[in-house]
Amino acid sequence: MENVNVDNVNMKDYRFISLGGGREVGGSCYAIKIGRNFLMLDAGIRNTSFNRVPDITPLYSLWGLDGLWELDAVIISHSHIDHTGALPIFMRDINNVRIYSSQATPDMLSAQNKYDSSYNKARDVASISDILIPVEFYKEFRVKDLALKFFPAGHITGAAMTLIQHEDRKILYTGDFCDFNQYSVKGADVPEMKIDTLICESTYGYSKSIGAADLVELAQRINMLMNHSGLIACPVRNSGKAPEIALAVRECMHRKLIPEFDIWLDESSEAFCRVCEKWNGINILGEHIKPINDYIHGSRGLIISGENFSRQPNLAFNMSNHADCDGILDLIFKTKPDKIIFVHGVPLIKSPRNIVNEVRERFGDSIEVIHGINGQEIPLLNK
Ligand SMILES: [Zn+2]
């Protein structure tokens, strides 16, 4: 990445505020001010019935902005509603602000818009997915004095880490990331370079990791359910999980852990699988995995659906698509930041792991580590 030459900007001119998604999982929305450059990183909502929208008043009270229209850009890390759900709400103000995402994210968002009833649709603006400016991974783009680049973050199709460079300073915002390969998405491709500040999600930095699908355990559950009924259902609360569960179940068949049968995708699950095929270069529909329209009454198999099937035994199965504490530590070893701002995590006193404490134990004073608190400004640089 070539350096960007601008007027002298002091260390204190690099600032960060968590507007939402600080010490919580939900409502991710962060603001960065570097000299005269203003960025918003994600614009999510909380999965609650009240206080859903991030509080943007610190932008006025602390940074003196008149409105969101003064932002230079909004960067969307991935399509999940806790990172995008506020876009329709902010849209009137950010109508003329450039909103960047990876190439796959508009497709993910349009599948989400169509099928996810929890998504807060904007009736009076064009579809959000049409407004995003898609940028290839690894390709530099400019926002005023800043040079930015997306890197694959794993997690879900299209998820991106964002490298933000100003002069010779480098800041990496992880969004949600996953360091291990899933069946539907490869693990994150972390930029292996020394960075100044890491703004890092910490969902599983404070808990025991769930990890990727344990196929033996998955097969045991399927076999048990199949003994009771020839047709089982896998309700996926978020149909974005459909590609991963479908491929994990098919892999169980390949390893002969379960008998061969067909997996049927409801319309929304199929839409997410198609996006995944398009952008991740993998085949999902075909061998054993079919659209629900192909279902023949009385067939044995598995239905993956955004709906609940009360009459069928349900396959409930936990899989993680976030880096755990060790995955986050690995990212820190690779990027050697001087400062880490953790966000998107709930620090618990008695949690089995505590990423902040573990970083302090391993790195001592060589890394300043802090957990973002909503509404409070944090200096973005350590030195
Ligand atoms: Zn996510």
Image (spheres, rainbow, N blue to C red):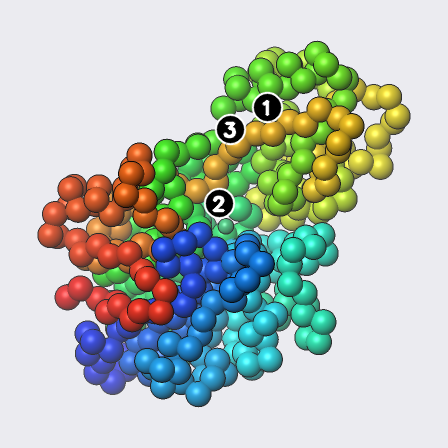
Residue 197: x and y in percent read 26, 60
At 61% from the left edge and 70% from the top edge, which residue is drawn? 88
Q: How many marks?
A: 3
Indicate if the residue with disc 3 has its beta carbon within 8 Å of ligand 1.
no
Q: CA distance from mark 2 to mark 1?
A: 19 Å
At mark 1, the secondary structure is helix
Q: CA distance from mark 3 to mark 1?
A: 11 Å
- Would you say the residues marked 2 and 1 are in contact, meaning their CB atoms lie under 8 Å apart? no
| Mark 3 vs 2, N-terminal side | 2
Residue 178: x and y in percent read 43, 43
Residue 251 is tagged as 1
Considering every residue shown, the one lying at the far left of the view is 365
At 64% from the left edge and 27% from the top edge, which residue is drawn? 315
At 75% from the left edge and 26% from the top edge, which residue is drawn? 312
| Mark 3 vs 1, N-terminal side | 3
Residue 120: x and y in percent read 64, 63
Indicate if the residue with disc 2 has its beta carbon within 8 Å of ligand 1.
yes
